[in-house]
Amino acid sequence: MGHIIDFKKGEPTYVPHICAKEAIAIGAECVDEKIDVLGPEEAPVVPLTPGEREQALIAAFRLLEERNGRSDFDASGAPNLKAVEKIVEFDVNKAELNALWVGYRAEAGQ
């Protein structure tokens, strides 16, 4: 099994432990700094509670009504699913969207 390592002068490069002797033999030097091979760890996504989802969707409805963009609503007058998802930044299913939209419109007296 072979390994290919692309060394660049002055730039730390990860070398697998199995290749360390060969890398040192060709002039590579060990550095004291730790090299982050995996990159920064992303924070886990915490799912929203049903109440938080509802609040976020209603806020999105208000924003869509205020800006009244051309592609913000579909032919039936309901909010466009993609426009809502872009605002709230989570996936929404059409049934959830429609149920909340009907309730939102009823509260508004429309």
Image: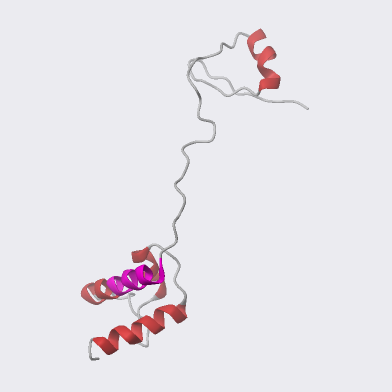
Q: Name the residue nearer the viewer: 13 or 60.
A: 60
**Image color mode:** secondary structure
Q: Quadrant of residue 73?
A: bottom left
In terms of secondary structure, what is the magenta stretch mainly? helix
Residue 17 part of the magenta-drawn span: no
At which x and y percent is residue 10? Answer: 48, 15
Please tell me which residue lies in front, 55 or 5: 55
Residue at the image point whose x is 39% and y is 68% from the top = 85
Counting from the top left corner in percent of width and height, residue 110 is at 25, 91
* Number of on-image labels: 0
Does residue 2 sit above or below 75 in this rendering?
A: above
Q: In this view, does 26 lie to the left or right of 37?
A: right
Specify whether 38 is left or right of 98. Answer: right
Residue 77 appears in the rendering: no
In the image, residue 22 sits, relative to residue 104, either above or below, namely: above
- The residue under the point 23% across, 91% down is 109
Q: Is residue 54 magenta?
A: yes
As drawn, 54 above or below 37: below
82 over 100 or under it: above or below: above
Quadrant containing the N terminus in the rendered view: top right
From the viewer's perspective, is 49 left or right of 37?
left
Give me the residue at 62% from left, 22% from top: 15
Q: Specify start and end residues of the magenta stretch as a single range.
A: 49-60
> Which residue reaches farthest right?
1
- Percent position of residue 103, x then y: 33, 86
Camera-side residue of 102 and 68: 102
For the question of whether residue 81 can be seen, the reply is yes
Residue 79 in which image quadrant? bottom left
